[in-house]
Amino acid sequence: MASLFGKNKSTNKPLILLSHKLERRIAIQLGEFQKNFTSYLRNTFTTDTETNDVLLSCYCSEDTIPDRIFVATLVVGKNFYNQTQFTSLSDCIHVRIPHQDSTLSFLSDASESTYPFRQKLRQILTHDLEGRLAKNTLSTTLKNLQAAETATHALRIESRLFSEQVEDFKSKNISISKKLTNTRKQLEQSYAATQQDIAAFNAKLISSHTALEALKDFLQHPAPLWRRLARALRTPFVPYVPTLPETLTLRDFRACNTETLPDLILDPTETVCSDASSPKEDRPSSTGIKRILFVAGEPHTPGVVYRCHRNAEAARHAGFEARIQDCAVVSYDDIHWADVMILWRVEYSGHVSTILDLARQEGVRTIFDIDDIIIVPHYARVDLIDGIRSTGENEGSVARLFADMRRTFVRCDHGSTTTRELARAMHEVRPVVHLLPNTYDKPSLHRARLSRRLHEGLNLSAAGDTLIRIGYTTGTRTHQRDFATAVPAIAHVLKMRPNVRLVLFRDKQSQTSILAMEEFPELRGLGHQIEWRETVPLSDLPDEFARLDISIAPLEVGNVFCEAKSEIKFLEASLAGSASVVSPTGPFKRLVRHGETGFLADTPEEWTTALLTLIDNPGLRQRMARNAYHDVLWPFSPQAQARRIKLAFSSLGSDEDVAETGELVLARDRQERRNVPVIPESETLFHHDTFAEADVTVVITSYNYSAYILDALNSVSAQSLSQLDLIVVDDGSTDGSVDLVRIWMERNTSRFNRLLLRRSVRNAGLGGARNIGMDAAETEYVLHLDADNLLRPEACEKLHAAMTFGIAYAYPVIQCFNENGPAPIKSQEKATDISSFAVMGDLPFHPLNFVGGNHVDAMAMVAKWAWAAAGGYYVSREAMGWEDFDLWCVFAELGLPGRQVREILADYREHSYSMTNMSTERAAHKARVVEYIKSRHPWINLTAEAPVQRL
């Protein structure tokens, strides 16, 4: 090769012929080769096929190889078909040597002596090719690295500049916010002072007008002539001249010394970026949280419904946007979208660590949520958690799980949980823990109540069945020792009462019992009294509770793990109308009113007594189930949860927001628990149910109103709302009105989804009668109508439309009428823009309206959960008449809003036999009513305590 290169150097003629395709492929590499290694050579390579004296002809495998034999031919490429005249030096290089070329003939020699040389040459060529590829790759990588370093350096400089701009904008924003706050406070003070000035000026204006009217009357009606002559003969004579009213002058409104806000002009072409610690440009301030992300650590368990789905729905009702995402698929986009993340049962991992790091960079607040004590690793012992043994787990793995949960909690800002006991355990890690109990949602409530109606109406419950069913609705084999606390009593009861059945559950697929029955020898020989049910999805669970007469929830009292369990089993049984016996753990003791809404039982003797008492007293069992239903309807409602969630997120705001939130939370915690509504005993005289679902029930209360009751019924039948329930409660009438109502109902069953006629066993008074109707109603909203009044056709529809989420009651404008037609406005009243006749309910809603007296008539639509929250209408015959006013006052104390529908939707009949005139507005009776209401609501300051007849 050296001699060949030497020849090239002397002759400067090409030595190697390249095909055009090959030249295009390796031109760059050849240029580098000549430049770096053979720079002294000229014209080493050529593509001119007419060139003579070349030593080597090179082609690529896609070329058409000419049939030359006078010059060595080299083919480069893997896909070359190896012809017999070519020798393969490597996978990519194939050579053909002409016979006359003695110098290279050894390459084609197949003798054994030349084989090692050819193999060595193949290795050299292969290694050289790999080395060149590696060198090219390294060169490309170095260039890319240099470009990346340059770009990174530029980005760092740009980020530093943008960070400085962001900090400048932050300081300007803080300054502007402070000035806006000061200006707002000054404007509020100025507005309040102006209102006071206007009120004082109006008072003076009225006084002046009165004086001028008196002067006008004096001048237009002078004294008679004889009186003036008599006065003239008197001595001394002092004529009477009325004093002119003070001249009024308009005062200037007080000036508001507002601060001048700086102009902040941004370049519209400038894009502002923030560093990792800066808030997103579209993120609300700390006091403006809008988006909540629920992260589910156990997305395929029933708990995700209670802790994520239902709380997310409550958050939406509270005015926030909410999403639910499985922890495993949470992405940066999810974190960037959120203002707050709630992590439910999320174990610590590398992925979770990244989530929390990104959340802190993005300014996202984090809340860790649990519904069991799973953050204390040393609680992972079989003697505390029997489920470790019964499910085949080991203490070590459970302890590691608890430790990972705790690591996640430590990285979060706040905590949230279901019970006070759990909150106490979480306080050791984070001081701020929000109490968000497990709740029901609207579909589960409707399913539970419909199932109860079906079982009662079709005689499938205890009301029409001789069997009494005691149910234990566990879904996992983690409650062996819990159930064992009640087993001796249950076995004793089954032996004593052959008509009692124990309802247990088994897996639908394997048909194996959820409970390990071999651990309960007391139940041997009682298999014929055990009723097996298959496990069902959570959405179908209300159907199972509705079948039960008695639901039990045994737990190990004193066990730290069991003491923190939520009240969910009592809640779900109560919604479905089942009476409950539960263990006296902390949450159950605070919730259950022993002997009134349920029984608390710890020892076998207490369990036996409680069960036998409920079995042998069906009336007590039904009353207890009814009271329990009313008692859970408000505290575990979506409405109550929405209020809690709103307060929890408000505690993530500014210091002022946090202080106000803390004040409100503490004040609500100090509120006395309301009594359950008093439901007087009644009997059903007529019952019709199509088992459809209406949204509204109209409740008519009647006492000796046979002259008017049919008008009221017909006004309900004429409602524009198609699906409607109607309940009439007769409070012991003696005038034949009950027969009129029964006959009317028999003729109008096709109009209503549900028709019910109830009569109180003893005259209960207005509050008792209304509570009977509210208890019987199975819709979310109830419109009350006295039997002597009327509804206009769109009353139910428009009031129902006003009852949006969280509204406790809606009231219309009501026009008064008598036997002569619409009642005229009284002399002391003013005409309104609604009607030129006398009306009620014309004031917009404001809770402080009730300080001076009642402005809302009883003909209002009331949410049943709100009625239950208030403890129902009070029942007192001695103070009968202001039950509706008392209910509105309780709503005001609970912070439950009302809403006015500013339209005449009902008519109030004024007649001498009304309850108002016959009872409420009698002097002695009204004095008792006023005293009673003041004792219940000391904050009211009535402006009209004297009796006033409505005629």
Image: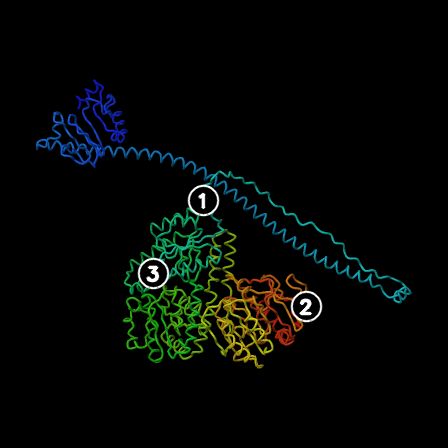
In the image, what residue type sits under mark 2?
A: Pro
Q: Give the position of the C terminus as an image quadrant.
A: bottom right
Reading the image, the residue beneath label 2 is 824
Residue type, label 1: Ser
Marks 3 and 1, the one that precedes in the sequence: 1
How was the colour assigned to the protein in this rendering?
A: rainbow
| Quadrant location, the N terminus | top left
Q: Residues within 10 Å of mark 1 (few under 14, many from 20)?
A: some
Q: Nearer the viewer, residue 674 or 897?
A: 897
- Identify the residue at horizontal 60%, vertical 77% (top origin): 707
Kindly state the secondary structure of the residue where label 3 is placed. Answer: helix
Residue appearing at x 21%, y 25% in the figure: 16
Question: Which is more toward the observer, 915 or 754?
Answer: 754
Q: Is residue 359 above or below residue 869?
A: above
Q: Where is residue 828? Give x, y as percent.
A: 69, 66
Residue designated by label 3: 379
Give the crowd class for mark 3: few <14, some 14-19, many >=20 residues within 10 Å.
some
The residue pinned by badge 1 equals 278
Q: Earlier in the sequence, mark 2 or mark 3?
A: 3
- Say if residue 896 shows up in the picture: no
